[in-house]
Image (cartoon, grey):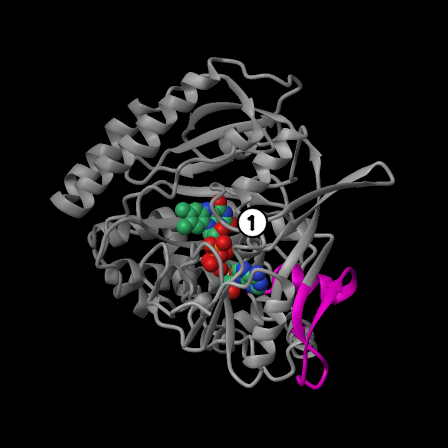
Amino acid sequence: MEQAKIVQNFGRNLRFKPSHFYSPINKDELIDILEKHKRGKIRVVASKHSWSGLIETEGVLIDMSHFDYVKIQEKNHETSVTVGAGCKVKKLLADLNQKGLTIPSVGLIAQQTIAGATATGTHGSGKHSLSHYIESVQLACFDENGKSAKIVNITEGVALQAARCSLGCLGVVVEMTLPCIPQYFVQEKATFCETIEEVLILEKKAPLQQFYLMPHSWKFFAQERLVSLELRRRGFAAIYRIYWFLVIDLGMHLVMKLLVSILRSRRLVHIFFRSIVPALVFHNWLVTDRSDRALVMKHELFRHLELEAFVVRSHVVEAASFIKDILQYADDGNHQLSDSTNELIQKAQLFDSLSSIKGCFTHHYPICFRRIMPDDTLISMASGVSEDWYAISFITYVEPRDEFYALATFLANSMFELFQARIHWGKWFPQTSKLVNQLYPKIDTFRDVCSRYDPNGVFRNSFVEDKLDL
Ligand SMILES: Cc1cc2nc3c(=O)[nH]c(=O)nc-3n(C[C@H](O)[C@H](O)[C@H](O)COP(=O)(O)OP(=O)(O)OC[C@H]3O[C@@H](n4cnc5c(N)ncnc54)[C@H](O)[C@@H]3O)c2cc1C
């Protein structure tokens, strides 16, 4: 056992001190920890990139970073990888790349651990979430009476669907197996569009595309992405990576931090997004790069906080127009809402809560839209319907965050009423269990699986008890 210290997450919106902190080096040690604390409360912590209260505990906190092995195997001409729970996605990608392989999906950064990323349904664009692909999970949990700790392998059925995106509620993930695919290259081009309909048309030829609604110009910027037929870098990819790092990852973020945190100027934020950001983007630079370079960015360089709302494809056009109007209203209390937004607000009886965000917050970050194919899980955000989902993210770099929290709460609740929007489990999470119960049709099955592997609720904290009615 290590000395328990104060734990802070990436966004610094969580700060707590667990009673005990362990970093086991093998399964025997892990089982001993579970045996010792079977009458207490246990949570697992990984890279601490989540903003929701998932890792918070006054009980035992376990860190699985010693479990970072990567074992590649081949069976019946299919290649898979068994990866230790605490392995960072970037190490997994690097090890697989050495063998000309990769995993089927990756998010915007690769700093998360594999167990942390899959526990919350982490996703990229144009594929399923990472959780969907999990073939088996090895779990440290309790027997049916909750009397002794044991290791189980979960390979099928509802238990596997629950373990793929478990929010840490089934037990401690020891390792998991994922399919590998041959390493591939991604072709990318930046394009500005006036409307979301134009962007969605581009998706047909660029299925890995992600796009942004740019605040204050209210134009769309698409990163058209598709799998390249060529297996080599093209279009000065190395220079493109340096440009992207210096100009976007560093430069754009530094200027934006200066405007919103130091100068606190609404007018300069408007000018920045209307005139400067469009000039920073090279239109039509056609570049091809390896997938693990092309699909990620250095988004972890500056501390921020994020809410992400998921809507199905049939709602995404209406949702984009609603968001634009609401962000304009939050920026400027005199903004006239469009007739369609007024109708929606009236239909959902949201006028009272709308007044609470009038002129309260100038949004200052591109609103990213990513398409996620439906997942075979019980409670990941993209679980359960046949339509594709769009994850829509709202990010703030301003602190204190009270105004953003008010806006984000309004967005989460109004988008639930209007579009049945689900909120990313790993991001800032204002929705209540009442909404969660309506949004996830298989939540009862998830609760049953949790009770099977953890009959005494040892692996629950107040966040999961509160949001999942556990
Ligand atoms: C800069 C940044 C960029 C991001 N980009 C994306 C993105 O592109 N797409 C996206 O979907 N999300 C994204 N996220 C969110 C992030 O992927 C999720 O919050 C993810 O869960 C974080 O993983 P982690 O390793 O930090 O886990 P933590 O945040 O430490 O933990 C997350 C959950 O996993 C559980 N857990 C971790 N390890 C285990 C284990 N061994 N056994 C059981 N439970 C475990 C924890 O208990 C907790 O419930 C981003 C976050 C940041 C800060």
Relative side of 396 to 341, left or right: left
Q: Quadrant of residue 213?
A: top left
Magenta segment includes 206: no
**Residue occupying the far top of the picture:** 235
Residue span colored magenta: 139-167
Q: Which quadrant of the figure contains the C terminus?
A: bottom right
The reply, left or right, for residue 336 in relation to residue 232 is left
State the residue position of label 1.
87
Which quadrant of the view contains residue 440? bottom right
Q: Amino acid at mark 1?
A: Cys
Q: Position of residue 75 (x, y in %)?
A: 84, 42
Whether residue 106 is visible here, answered yes or no, is no
Q: Judging from the image, what secondary structure is the residue with disc 1 in? A: loop
Q: Residue furthest right?
A: 76
Q: Which residue shows up at 30% across the image and 35% down it?
A: 217
> Image quarter for residue 258?
top left
Q: Nearer the viewer, residue 375 or 294?
A: 294
Instruction: Look at 59% across and 55% down and name the residue there.
Output: 85
In the rendered image of this protein, does residue 221 appear above or below residue 71? Answer: above
